[in-house]
Structures are given as C-alpha cells and as structure tokens.
Image (cartoon, rainbow, N blue to C red):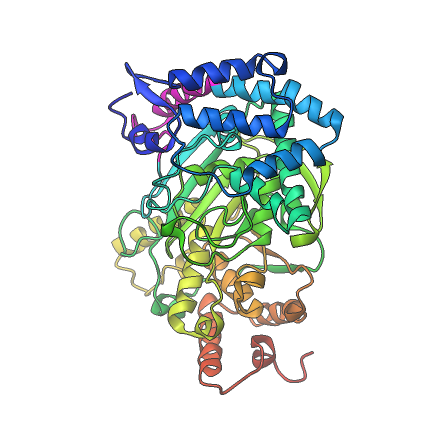
Amino acid sequence: METRGDLASILPFLPLVLRSSSLCWPSGALGSLKALALGSDVSRIRSGEVLFDAILDLRESLGLSSQPLAYGSASGFSSFFDELMSKEDSRIWFDNVVPEMARLLLQLPSLLESHYLKSDELFSEGKSGIRIMGPQEPGRVFLSQELIAALLSCAMFCLFPTSDRGFRGLPIINFDNLFAPLYWNEKQHQVQKVKCIVHYFERITSKMLTGSVSFERKVLHVDNSDHGLAYSSTTYWRSSTTPLCPFEVFSEGLIEDQPYEAIEVDFANEYFGGGALGQGCVQKDKHYQHYLGISKQEEIRFMINPELIVGMLFLPSMNANEAIEIVGVERFSSYSGYGHSFQFMGDYQDNKPYDSMGRRKTWIVAIDALCNPRMRQYGIEYLVRETNKALCGFFDQSKYKCRIEDIGNSESKGNPEGTSVSESSQARNFQGSRGIATGNWGCGAFGGDPEIKSMIQWLAASEGLRPFIHYYSFGEAALQKLEEATRWILQHGWTVSDLWSMLAEYCDQRLSSKTFNGFFDWLLPCNYF
C-alpha cells in the first residue's frame, strides 16, 4: 500500500493511518468506535449532547483538537436530536443507527483496501483508486455504496482532517457545518436538510446497499491535443456547422424527475457541493475568503442524493475548462418546496435500473457558471467561457471519438471537398446517446441572464453531439418566450454557427447600449408573437 500514488494523495485527508502496509484506525479511536458499536447500553450515548461529546473525544484521539468545529455545532446536535426529533425516532437513532454507523467505521480500513484492489483489477494499478483528483487531471473513480456510507459516517462524526483542505481547493466535508446553523436564524430550512441526511443513515444502516457510484473529472484541454476535446475559441464557435439539436421546454416538473435517462445538470458552485453542508455564505478558512454563489438547486440535490457529498472529499474546485460527472447516485428522500420553503417529505424508493457496472442509471453533470456577472456576461470572453464550460459537461465522448475518426479519414483522403468537422458528423447515429435535462443554470442567485444562459446550453449540447435538450424553466418569467424562440430557430434550420453569431452580435449591442431588449425580443420579427 505504501507505493500507491492514489492512496498517498488522499491519506492526509483521511482519519486513518498506514502501518505495516495496512490501513487502520489509531488505537485510541479504535477503542472508542468499538464501544460505540456495542450500542447505547455500553456507550451511554442517548442524546445529541452526549453524542457530540463522544465526537470530540474521537477527534482528540485522532489529533484533530487543534482544528475547531463550526461555532454552534454542539448546540445544533443537541437541538436536533434532543428537541426536534421525536422520542421514538431518537431512541431508534441512538439504539440502532449510531451503533451501525460505528460498525461501518470499523470496516472503513478493509473497505478501502478492497476498493484499491478492485480498482487495480479494473483499471491501472496503483493510480485509479480514490485519490485527490486535482485540477487539469481528467480521471474517474468508482466507489461502492458501502464505502460511500462509511465515508459519510466519518463526515457525520466530523472525523476528517481539515487543516489543509482549503489550501488544496477542497470544499468543507465534515457535518459540523450542517448542524451549526440550527443554532442560528435559518433554523427551519436547515432542519429539513438535516432530516434528509439523518434519513439516509437510517436507510443504509437498516439495509446496506450493494451498487456503485462513479465520479469523473472532465477537462477540455487548452490545446488541440490527442487527449480529447479542446477549449474552443470564438472562431471555432463561429465556424461550426453542427446542426442545433431538438429543444423542448417544460414549464412544469423537475430535472431529477425526468423519465428519459437524460444527463441531469447540477447548477454547481466551483467548489463541488457549494453551500450544501452549510448556509452557502463565506467559508471560514483563509483560502476560501470569497463569496460562494448559493445554488439552491444543487443544495437540494445533495440532500436528496447524499452520496454526492462524498465527492466533496476528493474533488478540488473546478477551473473554467472543467466539469464533474457522477453516475449511479441513489435518491433517498422526497421533498417539496425550494430554497427556504424546502421540506423533507419522507422516504423515496429509487427504482431506476442498474447498468453493467452496478450503477443506478442516473447521470448528473456539475458545471459552475459565472457568479454575479452583471454586464460582463455579455463580453465575448465570458460568452466563450460559459459555452465551453457547458460543452465540457455535455459532450458525448463516444460520439466525439467517432468524429475524430471522421476527421482522420477525411484528412487521409485530402478532404477534397473541404468537409468540416461538423459536416462530417451530421449524419451521426444517436442510438444509445443521452440527451440533456437542464434549466436555469447560472441564473437566480448566480445572477445570469436566463435567455442567454438557455442559448449557451443549447449551443453546448448541440456541439457536444447530444440528441436533445429538455429545458425545465421552473416558471422563470424571463423565459416566457423561450418555446416560441427555439421553435422559430429550428424552423429556420440554424446551425451552431448561426446561433453563436447572433448571440455574439446581441451581446455586443448590449455592451454598447445599442439595445436594452432581451435576446428573444431582439432576435425575432416584431409580428412573430
């Protein structure tokens, strides 16, 4: 195990130690976990207040006392488990759930070692297991749902070291930040988030899951290398002859409820998970001292699909040419509302089938938009940035390989007719390809122009060779003309180049104050509506 590069990168961020080629808990923590695993009659833990004291003892045995937990977290644990939870639910939590979580933690070393061995069997030896998947390093990691449950139990008990996470661009991971706001004003909203997480642990400790989840860091390379699709300039977008894909608008419904096996877009923060574990404000660590845009959509998604949270352990912040794709996370909670009206509504049984790798057929891609861009979003540099960001998340790797082969064949023949990259793939076969299910990405709290952002995503999905976009407008007033505008564009047979050129011209006019109309009013004939 000592020679593994993947383990070496993440070991400083785990509560385990490596001794005699084996992972293990430090002796003090091991004894405490064994006592917890024997149940409340032995551990005497029957309240949130005592549970938090046990967490502090565990942290001290791991040498984490110098890394303080969020202010108010002690009161948050006590408030939730001793006041807000019913007596019966509290009894079940301390008698059944907490001991099972402790048993999971005792298995963590062996679960990790099994994970690394399996990774070697499936992929390259010593490099493909769980690791810090740094910027500009495309790659994928597969985790069993049981390992994810053990790692999230670590987060629940606040056992991850945090001192260097900000320096490495890693988001917060321990759940003290989830409980601390219960001490403050946004109590009811935060309570609902905690209910989702507690429900997840109730589910996985009653019946352990046997599937797997993959996390992939996707990168658009800044040069035209052989590694994959490159970060494209305005010249590329202006010359692309790729036809626009079908675009369907849904005024009602939610992205996560779509039935078409489409890729579901997570309106992400550059830090994967954003404010999901806290209130989405300003991080405490000196390396995080800037405003984090709060995506309520992402916040909810991480609560109803808590397995997403484990990605926050090893995925540093995204650069402009990066996206994160997750396949296989299971949904555990039903909910209603949005933002401060969000309510946990009980159990959700996820009946999506599994793929050949044991993953639920749920595909999610996290892409972060510009935060609070105001007028700069109309600048060509930022238009290119946003379109490439969406393209990184959306492009279909399997279809892109076919496109590369088309280019190679065309070049080997001298390309006598001057066929472009896009033209050579217009007759592409979409069988087995998934479309995009998205909505108001980069709008709301992030402050983007909904009309521009919808068109950017359409460009990216089309150039990424996706067969369709299903757009969930969520009642956005600014998008009342979206359906009519997309229908008009499709009727005229526009390509990516056509839409990009008009979008760029409109943005130039907005910057120079030559127009103050929205894009759809500016684009369409006066008598069209």
Rendered position, 453 above or below 517: above
**What residue do we see at 69% from left, 22% from top?**
92
Work out whether residue 118 or residue 185 is closer to the camera in this orientation and state it.
185
Rendered position, 511 above or below 451: below
Q: Position of residue 408 (x, y in %)?
A: 29, 51
Residue furthest bottom in the image: 514
- Quick check: 342 left or right of 114? right
Rendered position, 384 above or below 23: below
- Quick check: 330 left or right of 290? right
Q: Position of residue 291 (x, y in %)?
A: 46, 59
**What residue do we see at 69% from left, 47% from top?**
188
Q: Position of residue 397 (x, y in %)?
A: 41, 46
> Which quarter of the rendered picture does the N terminus lie within?
top left
How many labels, in total?
Answer: 0
Can residue 214 be found in the magenta stretch?
A: no
**Residue 488 appears in which quarter of the rendering?**
bottom right
Work out whether residue 223 or residue 435 is closer to the camera in this orientation and state it.
223
**Residue 235 appears in which quarter of the rendering?**
bottom left
**What residue do we see at 56% from left, 79% from top?**
523
Work out whether residue 438 or residue 131 is closer to the camera in this orientation and state it.
131
Q: What predominant SS class does the magenta segment belong to? A: helix
Magenta region, residue range: 106-131
**Residue 307 appears in which quarter of the rendering?**
top right
Q: Position of residue 370 (x, y in %)?
A: 46, 62
> Which quarter of the rendered picture does the C terminus lie within?
bottom right
**Can residue 351 be seen in this snapshot?**
no
Can residue 117 be found in the magenta stretch?
A: yes
- Quick check: 2 left or right of 56? left
**Can residue 205 be seen in this snapshot?**
yes
Rendered position, 255 above or below 445: above
